[in-house]
Amino acid sequence: MYVSFEEFEQLVVNALDELPKAILEHMDNVEVIVEDWPSEEQFEENGLDEGGTMLGLYEGIPHIDRVSSYGLVLPDMITIFRGPVLSEARESGTSVEQVVRETVIHEVAHHFGISDERLLEIDRY
């Protein structure tokens, strides 16, 4: 299924809007953007080879690591990657909307300091 860049951005906005109010109220100093594909540097910095899959990426200082001197810091960045998300939806038979929602939730969890390992534990229950 083809989804234009603009339609994809709207799916990301919708996924953010669907987050619980308590989560949205505590998201601080973070920007969410859409890119078509991760860069080679993003793969390398995260220990992945270019054959790996990266649906989204959180870069920044998680809430749990922010100290009282935290300030005048560039915003954290959550990037949702359109190409890999569309591929994942097609390969898994899952809707693009669902893959976007899951990816947004996953990256927002990192913004709050929840690790991939902990997310896997939570997902098992």
Image (tube, rainbow, N blue to C red):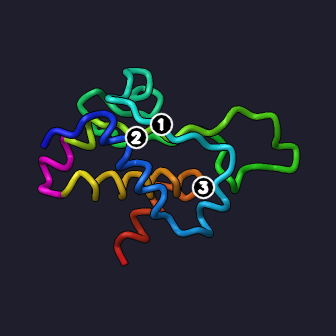
Mark 1: which amino acid? Answer: Ile
Query: As drawn, is 32 to the left or to the right of 49?
Result: right
Counting the numbered discs, the total is 3
**Which span is picked out in magenta?**
87-94
Q: Position of residue 93 (x, y in %)?
A: 12, 56
Mark 3: which amino acid? Answer: Gly
Residue 79, image quadrant: top left
Instruction: Give the mark nearest the N terminus, 1 or 2.
Output: 1
Q: Position of residue 8 (x, y in %)?
A: 32, 42
Residue 97, image quadrant: bottom left
Mark 2: which amino acid? Answer: Ile
Residue at x-position 87% and y-position 50%: 68
Find disc 3 in the rendering and name its residue.
113
Residue 31, image quadrant: top right
Within 10 Å of disc 2 (Cα), the crowding (few <14, some 14-19, many 20+) is many
Q: Position of residue 51 (x, y in %)?
A: 23, 31
Query: As drawn, is 68 to the left or to the right of 34?
Result: right
Q: Nearer the viewer, mark 3 or mark 2?
A: 2
Dominant SS of magenta comes to: helix
Quadrant where the C terminus sits is: bottom left
Question: What element does badge 2 sit on?
Answer: strand
Q: CA distance from mark 1 to mark 2?
A: 6 Å
Q: Farthest residue in the bottom direction?
A: 125
Q: CA distance from mark 3 to mark 1?
A: 19 Å
Q: Position of residue 119 (x, y in %)?
A: 44, 62
Which label is found at residue 80?
Answer: 2
Give 30 or 50, whichever is nearer the viewer: 30
